[in-house]
Amino acid sequence: MPIVFDNVSYVYGENTPFEHKALDGLDLTISENEITGLIGQTGSGKSTIAQLCNGLYKPTSGTVTVDGVDINADKKKRRDNFFRVGLVFQYPEYQLFEDTVEHDIAYGPKNMGLDDAEIARRVADAARFVGLEEESLSKSPFDISGGQRRRAAIAGIIAMEPKYLILDEPASGLDPQGRDDILTKLKNYQREKGIAVVIISHSMEDMAKYCDKIIVLGKDGVYKYGTKAEIFADPVALRGIGLSVPQITKVMYKAEQLGVKFERPLYTVAAAIKDVLKMLDGEARDDT
Amino acid sequence: MIRDITLGQYFPGNSPIHRIDPRMKLLMAIIMIVATFVASSGTSFALLFIATLILFLLSRISVKTLMKGMKPIVFILIFTTFFQIFFTRTGDLLFEWRFIKIYTNGIIFAIKMFIRVIVLITSTSVLLSYTTSPIALTDGLEQMLKPLAKIGVPVHDFALIMSIALRFIPTLLEETEKIMSAQKARGTDFSTGSLMKRARALLAVFVPLLASAIRHAIDLADAMICRGYRGGSGRTKLNVMKLKFTDFLWLFAAAAVLAGTILCNPFTLDVIKGAFIK
Ligand SMILES: Nc1ncnc2c1ncn2[C@@H]1O[C@H](COP(=O)(O)OP(=O)(O)OP(=O)(O)O)[C@@H](O)[C@H]1O
Ligand SMILES: [Mg+2]
């Protein structure tokens, strides 16, 4: 069963001069067994949503249901929610604190009260998924590179084997190759485990490349929810809420205006290369 | 949440109190502190209480905010009041039950102590923390201490250290909150378990927090050097503080409260009486 937001509002600093309504009557659904992309302008409430999903924040009004249960109904079950809905914060590498990377990854599973053998299995598993080499596991988290630290932090959540995995801008601040690498690994992880993954990102490219469904947040609530094709069908409207379609899709629209017809809408460079090559191939054959 | 701690937090606004020059507010706060300590008669306490009430009402700070700020001292307040009531052994005996004896003076001292603490906290926090931004406060302090620079006291450096520290309090609080949330999401339990367990839970916050504080310090130092910071001499201010006529009126009012407090004390009254009778 999915994560469902029903008419959720969230107010920061209620009853202070700093009161700020971050979410107002939000309805949204995060489906199982797919990667959902959550995109929206800065300040649209993405991180707030993430923290509402696992119960770190309690909605000011409305309910958040996970697997059909209101997660804020039973205070004693709060910790269970954290384990069920794994949340990787933005810049998670700044929370590493144990003496070795291995111990840090084991921190979550240990808090779950698992036995040593199971913890060891999960740590090894998680490290493999994010691509951390054996030798960095025994190093101090302060002695490895930024990209490796990011991986270690993500592994720390993956090791808890949550049913839902939410990542707040997992690729921000990484080089292009690092971005692709980490997102690909996440996608593989999702495909292998069949869990629900939510990726929060600013990059339309990343959304197009790695997500099955996309939630676009507008000024007030969910602006649109659907597949890539549905979301990117109207670039003008997207621009209206301060977002845009992937670069390659823009190129495709331009080309279509100039009379070049593509067989299918294009959202990723890889698909575009394939189609253009096919087209060129076809033309070459026409010439001969 | 951690940010709910309001003691020492600035509430932006534009009340008459907000508009007083920070230097004057510092002086007024000092005067109020002196006044609370010299006050001893009932009249002087009433005077102080009314003066504080006026300050508070003019500042347009909500009662709720003030109460929240008082929370940390409630325990001390109750404790001292309790001590005054039960352990003062002078005056008339009011009540006796087994070993508990309550005397009139106990009650009087307790009430005075109570008003003293309330006045002290309210007046200083209304004047300084709630209505004066920390930056304005350090600026004011720096201006007031400037003469000391002549005898070699590094006033500017102290002011800089203080304003940087103040500047980073909200940042570090925010960071603490973020790190705590992140560790909670990994199942850290901050509120239950043995002392040892909780200490260990806190370690998960302190280590990243310390690392981040050091990172901030290095970044800030680099940024300051890159922008040509070279100490205090010859630096000018963007916002030059200027005293207004009303600022002096406020200072005068505070001085009047102090004078009134001293005049209302029995000791002074006796002295005055003595002078006239002679
Ligand atoms: N701790 C806080 N206290 C007060 N207001 C906050 C707090 N955190 C966020 N906000 C406000 O709530 C709104 C939503 O914030 P949120 O962090 O969820 O946005 P976001 O979509 O994640 O933005 P970004 O893309 O910049 O990460 C913003 O307007 C922000 O200013
Ligand atoms: Mg965010």
Image (spheres, coloured by chain):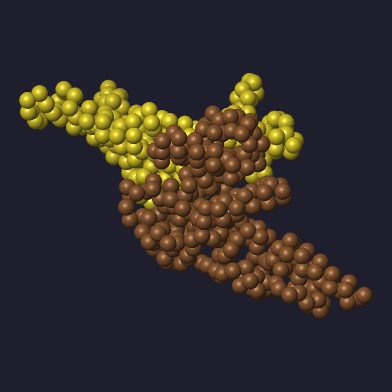
Chain colours: A brown, B yellow
In the displayed structure, would residue B177 be above or below residue B158? Answer: below
Q: Using the rendered view, name the quadrant where residue A69 is placed.
A: bottom left
In the displayed structure, would residue A237 be above or below residue A274? Answer: below
Whole-percent x and y of residue B61? Answer: 41, 50
Which residue is located at x 74 percent, y 69 percent? Answer: A250
- Examine the rendering and report whether any part of residue A45 can be seen: no
Q: Quadrant of the C terminus of chain B?
A: top left
Name the side, left or right, on which A283 lies relative to B182. Answer: right
In the displayed structure, would residue A62 be above or below residue A178? Answer: below
Q: Using the rendered view, name the quadrant where residue B277 is placed.
A: top left
Which residue is located at x 47 percent, y 44 percent? Answer: A160
Front residue of A140/B270: it is A140
Residue ranking furthest to the right: A288
Whole-percent x and y of residue A189? Answer: 57, 51
Front residue of A35/B214: it is A35
Q: Quadrant of the N terminus of chain B?
A: top left
- Examine the rendering and report whether any part of residue A272 can be seen: yes
Which residue is located at x 48 percent, y 65 percent? Answer: A28
Which residue is located at x 44 percent, y 33 percent? Answer: A116
Name the side, left or right, on which B79 lies relative to A72. Answer: left
Front residue of A3/B34: it is A3
Name the side, left or right, on which A234 lies relative to B189. Answer: right
Whole-percent x and y of residue B157? Answer: 63, 28
